[in-house]
Amino acid sequence: MKRDEFLQVLKVVVKMVEEMSDEDFRVFKRGRLRWVGPKKKIRPEQGAGAEAVDYSKVIATLNEFNDESEALSYLASCPEAKTNAQLWQLGRLLGAHVTKRMVKAELQQAIVRYCVGRRLQSETISRVTRHR
């Protein structure tokens, strides 16, 4: 360590001691104060919790489709659901069975199956039961 570096370290220590309260200094003299470095910066969450995206428009549009392939193509081109994290968040919001391990195509398929497939299936069942 060079002399200049040592002096810089001493300046930092002096600054830390000056900022201590009287009680902290007494504890420090007894040798019981633990040095704690500067507080770590907390990174903002990334991925699903980072942004609050409004998916109501996407959900309303998905519920209008009568064909799963059309809904899949819409969801693939939808700017609100481009990443896996956004698709996962949309699926969780809908209540569809989605997991973090799913790839993008699986997430899109699960969401479309939940929105379009379930509705079409329930409409078919209601038509069949009406005829009986």
Image (tube, rainbow, N blue to C red):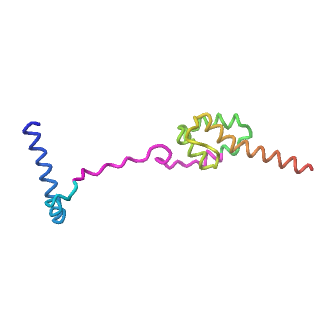
Report the front residue among 23 and 19. Answer: 23
Identified at 24% across, 50% down, the residue is: 37
- Furthest-left residue in this view: 3
In front of the other: 49 or 73: 49
Q: Residue furthest bottom?
A: 23
Range of residues picked out in magenta = 35-60
Residue furthest out toward the right: 132
**Rendering coords of residue 90 (x, y %):** 58, 45
Magenta stretch contains residue 39:
yes
Q: Residue at x 13, y 45 (%)?
A: 9
Q: Nearer the viewer, residue 98 or 63?
A: 98
Is 95 on the left or on the right of 82, as rendered?
right
Location of the N terminus (image quadrant): top left
- Residue at the location (82% across, 45% down)? 124
* 89 displayed left or right of 114: left
Counting the numbered discs, the total is 0
In which quarter of the view is residue 88 placed? top right
**Is 7 in the magenta?**
no
Q: Is residue 32 above or below residue 99?
A: below
Relative horizontal placement of residue 34, taking residue 98 as reference (left or right): left
The prevailing secondary structure element of the residues shown in magenta is: loop
The image position of residue 81, as x and y in percent, is 56, 40
Give the percent coordinates (x, y) of residue 118.
73, 45
Percent position of residue 123, x then y:
80, 47
